[in-house]
Amino acid sequence: MSINLHHLRYFHAIVQNGGLVKAAERLNVSPSAVSVQLQALEDQLGHDLFERRGRQLLLTEAGRIALERAEAIFDAADELENTLKGFDRAKRANVRIGALATLSRNFQIAFLKPLLGRDDVRIVLRSGSMRELIQMLDAHHIDVLLSNTLPPRDEATSWTSHVISDQPISLIGPSSARRTSAPAKLLAEIPLIVPTLENHIRGEFDALVERLGIVPRIVAEVDDMALLRLLAREGTGYAIVPPIVVRDELATGLLKECGPLPGLKETFYAITPKRRFPNPLLKELMGARPAALKAPSRSRRHFNQ
């Protein structure tokens, strides 16, 4: 039996509007009518499309697959209409990326580089806290979560973490800074811009200065890597960051890398849910390992990445 597109429209409306009641309001029908249509579609497909948690409806894996196919069907219908009206709209596949709000933008762009500029791919980017993003991952609203920390694991964990890159944590200074074989010795002499206490980099940094018996002169604590980068550019102080965060500034000579701090590194992860039907675009992203994600070479001019 062919799928009833009317049922599919109702299902799509539930997802887009965040629940039965709001979907009913949008469609100008009763919530019970929407529920009946959804049940009919689930019966026809032989799978539950939503997991009901109290008043919330969360997409199941089958629901995510149904949503992707529904959007492809509706895109095809739009394409047909636009083609007949003299327009040409390329068919595109979707990939949904979630990233911690404080994660390096340079890292995110480098990770997405294999798909950037492709006419057949639509990239959806969302940012948030770890808790928000894990909920989105569990609800199949994103295909992968980019992070520099791992969420807690337990028996109910349904995700897998993949190490994408390990970056040294370096001391980054102004254009007048010089490379040194012992950058840690500078930590007691210069003004420093460091991550806030919630960031694991800060914990490693605090442990390092304690081992060295140094009392650092911290002039700014920042929880956003983009803002930390801008403060370093303004000459506020020397930054404690992975070089990828200031890749462009290192390339132009606006900032200089004094050197990696001993024992400090940042690991970037791609966290994916365990699914029977993973998004095929993830294979391209996970297997690419572009050069931009690798640690910077020490031999290049200006010690740039």
Image (cartoon, rainbow, N blue to C red):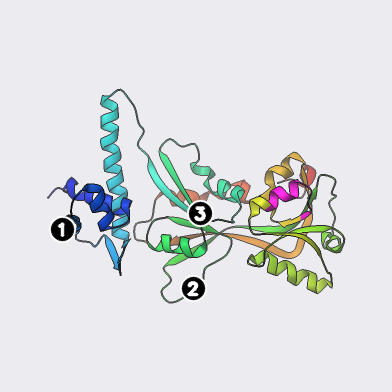
Q: Earlier in the sequence, mark 3 or mark 1?
A: 1
Three-letter code for the amino acid on which mark 3 is drawn: Ser
Q: Residue at x 79, y 55 (%)?
A: 259
Residue denoted by label 1? 36
Q: Residue at x 84, y 69 (%)?
A: 214
The residues colored magenta run: 228-238
Q: Is residue 296 visible?
A: no
Residue denoted by label 2? 153
Q: Is residue 229 magenta?
A: yes
Image coordinates for residue 68, horizontal then vertical, percent: 32, 49
Image coordinates for residue 164, horizontal then vertical, percent: 56, 57
SS at mark 3 in the image: strand
Q: Please tell me how crowded label 2 is: few (under 14), some (14-19), or many (20+) other residues with Cα within 10 Å.
A: few
Between the C-alphas of marks 2 and 3, the distance is: 21 Å
Image coordinates for residue 101, horizontal then vertical, percent: 55, 56
Foreground residue, 294 or 98?
98
SS at mark 2 in the image: loop
Residue denoted by label 3? 127
